[in-house]
Image (cartoon, rainbow, N blue to C red):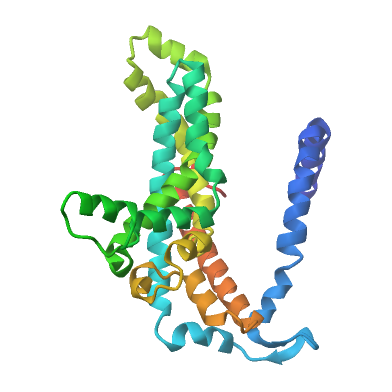
Amino acid sequence: MKVKRGFQDFLKEVKKNWVLFLMLVPAITYFIVFSYVTMPGAYVAFVNYNPNKGIFGSEFVGFKNFAFLIRNGDLVRITKNTLLYNGVFLLLSHMIQIVLAIMLSEIMNKIFKKISQSVILLPHFISYVVVGVFAYNFFNFDNGFINSLLVSLGMERISFYSTPGVWKYIIVFFYIWKTTGYGMIVYMAAITGISSEIYEACYIDGASRFQRIRYVTLPLLKPTFILLVLFGLGGILRGSFDLFYNLIGTNSLLYGQTDIIDTYVYRSLVGSFNFASSAAVGLYQSVFGLIFVMIINLIVRRVEPESALF
């Protein structure tokens, strides 16, 4: 009876807000076709894939396709690097996006505000290949901008491409520089959705601008922040391959500090067309991401139930 009543309530809701449900159809169709229909394809991670026999006709080999990750003892290293980089990317980028969104929302000059938004958003449209060229021209030993500047000041050159320790900071900088503008738009939209009456009430009560930000803007942005972080955690083992590869390339001196799952798999399987091993890595990343999201969502639900995904 409860199921029947729930279904009837759902039909009433669809009839009442049919336009909104119609707008959801393209997104629902996309996820059904490209996420759910393709899920049986994960079976390829457990077979010795033969294109002539197909996925379900190929020989079942169990976890053999995962062996190349464990064989050389690299699984822990690349998993740790991927987690640490993505963790820093996720938290630092969102904090900077919130700060910039608040700063821009407080600017009254519309022309300056639009110019600032455009300048901050511009790096999002720059290819990572171009970012790699920027980095090379900044850091190469012979005629890079920084080394040329150091020489002109009578100082010694720095061999950035043989110094692994500095690249974790360089990679984080370029990621933040490139992605901040796009993510900032989401928070600016959330700030725009905050009722002006709340700010007016605070102003009448004598609250300063910083107090309005602290006690109104930030608390109302918290659900958006938690939701975006939870979504981001789902891909915490999926590194930004194009960023890392274009900055590091095949420089083995830097692998200890900069190697992530995606770049390691690319180097291990390039030219071999090993679909099964690639699928095994993808499944490992997806399952780990799912478990991570479930755990974090459980914590969020206990601390602040209204901000949890489910």
Q: In the visual, does 309 lie left or right of 106? A: right
- Which residue sits at x=18%, y=49%? 153
Which image quarter: residue 158? bottom left
Residue 149 is situated, as x and y percent measured from the top left of the image, at: 26, 50
Q: In the visual, does 59 lie left or right of 173? A: right
- Which residue sits at x=45%, y=85%? 70
Residue 298 is situated, as x and y percent measured from the top left of the image, at: 47, 54
Q: Nearer the viewer, residue 32 or 1?
A: 32
Q: Nearer the viewer, residue 151 or 134?
A: 151
In the displayed structure, 100 sits above or below 49; it is above
Determine the residue located farthest toward the left in the rendered image.
154
Residue 129 is situated, as x and y percent measured from the top left of the image, at: 53, 57
Q: In the visual, does 11 lie left or right of 304? A: right
- Answer whether residue 294 is visible to the viewer in this image: no
Instruction: Please tell me how many numbered marks the rendered image carries.
Output: 0
- Answer whether residue 267 is visible to the viewer in this image: yes
- Which residue sits at x=48%, y=59%? 243
In the displayed structure, 197 sits above or below 305; it is above
Residue 234 is situated, as x and y percent measured from the top left of the image, at: 53, 58
Q: Nearer the viewer, residue 180 or 206?
A: 180
In the displayed structure, 119 sits above or below 287; it is above
